[in-house]
Image: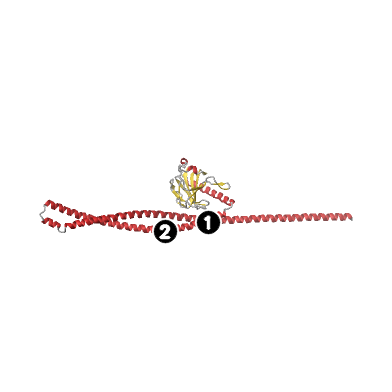
Amino acid sequence: MREKRTRLSQTLRASALCTGVFLCLFVGSANANSELEGVSDEIARQQSQLAAHNKKLNALQSDLKTQSKRIDTLSKKTRQAQQTLQQTDVQITRLSKKQARLKQEMIAQQAQLAELIDAQYRQGEHDQLKRLLSQEPPAKLDRLTKYAEVLASTMREAIELLAATRTDYQLTAHQLKQQRDKQASLVAELTEKKQALEREQASQSQTAKKIRAKIASDNAYLAELKANKQRLQEQIAAAARRAQVKMAGIGKAKGKLHWPTQGKLLHRFGERQSGEVSWNGIVIGAKRGTEVKAAHAGKVVLSSWLRGYGLLIAVDHGKGDMTLYGYNQALLKDVGDTVTAGEAIALVGDSGGQSTPSLYFEIRRKGNTTNPIPWLD
């Protein structure tokens, strides 16, 4: 009987132990599943946040692109209006000088005509008849007659010249009025365009500020930089393949290339941009709207907006040599245009999302970036 009770007790203890182990395993498994579900939820939440972040960033970049293109159009129209206004000012100055000269000529011609009239009057209405009836020698009479004829001829010429000068003066006055009216219209147009440009630039600045806030963290900024550089590499490679420019390159022009614009050097080639990413070119701070000039003769192979670089223009110089100009306010040349060294190709701006106007300048040789400084004059 005692042995039976002992075996029963052992059986119960074993059963309880198994039950305890099973319960522990069950509870442990439930906790593990719960933790896995929590991790999965967190991953899903972070992915959702990242997707929302990227969607917002892409939308802002799209807004920046649209605004940059509007600014590009307005800048070029403003520039054209300014150039036309300058030409009009030159015409007004020329016509004003001509008008003043003609006025002086008319005064002189009127004085000369008055003298001729006075001389003729002093001869008298019947002077010729009196001479004929007088006892003057024939030779003297011939001289007096000849004088009268010359005087009459000179008067006719003076009258005709004065009439021509007066007509020229009136025509010049009319042209001057037209140019001044045109000037007033251009000034009004220019003022309107400048105001529209300022509004667009203010909107662009706000968009750029939001973009910078979106990529404020080191990781986000680094990811954006890498993606931008990759996009640029692809665009440049495709443009070079399409263009097939047959020029001599820049190999013999080291130390002689034109500075694309004048200003303070904000970033140097090789300087750390973020993490392991360094600047592939230089950044020159300059006043918005300053002309950007081609460093060397070449052919435009890219002229468009590119994320991170804004309105960008690329000039192929042949032999695998290329110069890039980014952050522009406006692009003055189109793909296919041939440019000379020192020719204006763009205007300085901040279309890439920069906080201040500047120019990004890069030199590529056979696809590889190189320090621009030793190449510039």
Name the residue at 21% across, 54% down.
154
202 lies left or right of 142: right
Q: Amino acid at mark 1?
A: Thr
Say which label, 1 or 2, has the lower sequence index.
2
Residue 167: x and y, percent? Answer: 28, 57
Q: Quadrant of the N terminus?
A: bottom right
Residue 147 in view in this figure: yes
Q: Nearer the viewer, residue 43 or 126?
A: 126
Name the residue at 17% across, 53% down.
147
2 lies left or right of 223: right
Q: Nearer the viewer, residue 69 or 355?
A: 355
41 lies left or right of 365: right
The local secondary structure at tag 2 comes to helix
Crowding at mark 1 (Cα within 10 Å: few <14, some 14-19, many 20+): some
Instruction: Looking at this view, name the residue that lies furthest to the right.
Output: 1
Residue 59: x and y, percent? Answer: 54, 56
Residue receiving disc 1: 207
Name the residue at 74% across, 56% down.
27
Q: Amino acid at mark 2?
A: Glu
Colouring method of the image: secondary structure
Residue receiving disc 2: 189
Residue 241 in view in this figure: no
Q: Which mark is residue 52?
A: none
The local secondary structure at tag 1 comes to helix
Crowding at mark 2 (Cα within 10 Å: few <14, some 14-19, many 20+): some
